[in-house]
Structures are given as C-alpha cells and as structure tokens.
Image: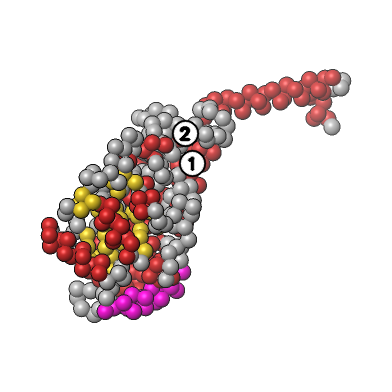
Amino acid sequence: MLTKRGNGLSRRDFLRLAGGTLASLGMSGALAPKLARALEKAAAGRPRVVWLHFASDTGCTESFIKSDSPDAAELVLDILSVDYHESIMAAAGKQAGEVLARAVAGKDYLCIVEGGIPTVPGHGRIGGREMLDIAKEVCGNATAVVAIGSCAVDGGVPAAAPNPSRIMGVGDALGRKVVNLPCCPVNPEWLVGTVVYVLTMGKVPELDDKGRPKMFYGRKIHDNCPRRTHFDGGRFVERFGSKEEAAGYCLYKMGCKGPETWSECPRTRWNSKESWCIEIGSPCLGCAENRWTDNFSPFYGKLADVALPYGDLTADKIGVGIAVATGAAIAAHAVVKAARGKAPDDDRKE
C-alpha cells in the first residue's frame, strides 16, 4: 500500500495524492496525514471492498477504471483491497463464487453495489442464485453499503415503466438505508471521494434526504453552470446548429434539466476534468436525480415549472420589450408634465 518499492506508492507520493484529493472535495489539505495514518493503520489488511453487479450496463465500472487521481491501478493495488469485482477479477464461474464466499466471511468490508435488483424470482440470477438473495447476504454483513449509479440507486433505466421484473434500487430492495451516488454513470471522483471521506473521518459524509452525500449533491447544476449568465440575461438556444448555440447561449429551451438537478458536475467535470455534458453543447438530462428517465422525458423538452427571468421570451424580444417600455415611460412623463402646464423640455431649465 504505502511502500518504498517500485510497485507501490511512497509516503510522499501518497501524501501528495491525498492532499490533491482532499482539496478537490473542499476539505483541508491538513487532513492528508490523517488519511495516510488511517490507511497505514490497516496496512496488514487494506480497506476491503466487495463490488456487486446486478441489472446494469457496467457503465459505473467503466467510469471507475478511468479514474486518474488516483487511477484504478493505485486504487485496486495500493489503496483498497477489491476482493471481489466480477469485471476485473481473474476468477470466473465456481471459482468466483468461492472468492465471494471468502470475501464476505470476514464481515469487515465495504460493499459497493452497481445495478438495480430484480425482485421477481427468476428474473435475475448469478451462479444459480437470485440477485436479491446475494444482495441480502453480502450487504447484510457489510460495514457500509454504497449504491453507485442510477440503476443501483432507484433501478435506473432497467426500472423504467413498465418494469416487468420489478427492478428496484438497493435501498428499496433491501429495506435499509444506504449511501446513494446517483448519475449515469457515477463520476469516479465522487466514489473515490466518498471512500476517502469514510477513511479519513471514520463515518459516512453528511447525506441529504435521498441518501446522497451533500459534498457532491449539495448544489444544483444551474447554480454553477457556466451558461448561467445567459439564462439570467434571457439568451437561449432555440435550435441546434444556430448562431446562438455557437455563442454558448443557455440550453434551457433545448431541454436542459440543470435547474432541477443536484450535482457537482460543473465542478468535478469528467474525463480527467476535461469537460462535461453542458460544456460540450448537450443539455443536462438530469441523470443525477431519481427516476430521471421517466420524470425528465422528453429529454429535449423544456421543463414546465421553471420561471424564466423575463418570461418565455427570446433575447431579441426582451431587447425590444425594454426599448418599448423605455419609450412608454418617456411618453408618460411627457403627458404628466403637459398636464401640469410644463413641456418636457422645461425639465432642462429646472
């Protein structure tokens, strides 16, 4: 884990890495030594992780293995002990089942769940066992359970109506509270950050009423969106391929769900912080919210309950409206002055 060998992290490298990670979470860099001590305390047995896959497209795993600060190799080989992960482990079939049995025997592990859980018997089985039974056994013995991605949080796309398999999120299927990290897929920094917080502080981070860590889901995308000034100024894209789109105007009228989506996407961004959905010209689809596939469709349809700063008008109409209002005010002032026996020009003599 923390080692002087070439295949591990040196203490200096780890402190630098920890400091950068803590800073990205808005936590003091002074906590880096505390995080290092927390990991060193478990040097004989790194913090153990059992990662379960259920009804999903493995998108969150794809996101996880593209993490770069720290990268997946450092996470799996140096920082965490990922004892079971069907997509990256060498074992398969019966051998994989034996690995899982050994992993959960110690009961001192963090369980990460990816994918929704089918609750109709026979609709979701792994190694001849019902997914729901596996979840009950593994999650029941875990010190903490983290549901990652929309599918694990509320069933996601697989649970969209009509949902014949009655797929549910982990918390609902098991009837217990879990840490929810929604998004489709989850941002790897949010997963790493949650684990870092637990290791550093010895508890889960503060959660909102949906079980989401407030440090990643505490503000709306709309509040931090780089196009917010265009929204406030009434400058909107109304057609893809238009000059307004090229100018980076607000995408609200093209279906952006940013005003109703709680997420730190504008800050953490994606692909090594290169960019994110709105920055590359796509409206936010609201995938960090529960039941987003049902509640926010059609994806390119405007939200109905968001008040625009100047009403439902284009920027040009707003400009014309301001000019008309200004002209009307001047005319009204002239009428009032005339009624008092003064011409408008008399104001210059006062």
Quadrant of the image occupied by residue 320:
top right
Q: What element carries label 2?
A: loop
Residue 320 horizontal side relative to residue 10, left or right: right
Does residue 323 appear left or right of residue 124 in this picture?
right
Amino acid type, residue under disc 2 in the picture: Leu
Q: Do the residues labelled 2 and 1 touch (CB within 8 Å)?
A: yes
Q: Which of 106 and 237 is in front in this view?
A: 106
Q: Residue at left 41%, top 66%?
A: 197
Is residue 182 one of those drawn in magenta? no
Residue 281 lies in what quarter of the image?
Answer: top left
Location of residue 240 with respect to 7 vertically, above or below: above
Majority SS type along the magenta span: helix
- Residue 53, given in percent of the width and then of the height, sits at 25, 53
Residue 221: x and y, percent?
45, 46
Which of the image's four quarters has the C terminus? top right
Q: Can residue 312 be seen in this view?
A: yes
Label 1 is placed on what type of residue? Pro
Residue displayed at 25% across by 52% down: 131
Q: Give the range drawn in magenta.
A: 28-44
Q: Mark 1 points at which residue?
A: 259
Circle 1 SS class: helix
Q: Residue at (48%, 54%) from the top-left corner?
A: 208
Residue located beneath label 2 in the image: 303
Percent position of residue 262, x then y: 46, 48
Q: Up-down: is 254 above or below 65?
A: above
How many neighbours does mark 2 have within 10 angstroms: few (below 14), some (14-19), or many (20 or more)? many
What separation in Å lies between label 2 and label 1 (alpha carbons)? Answer: 9 Å
Image quadrant in which the N terminus is located:
bottom left
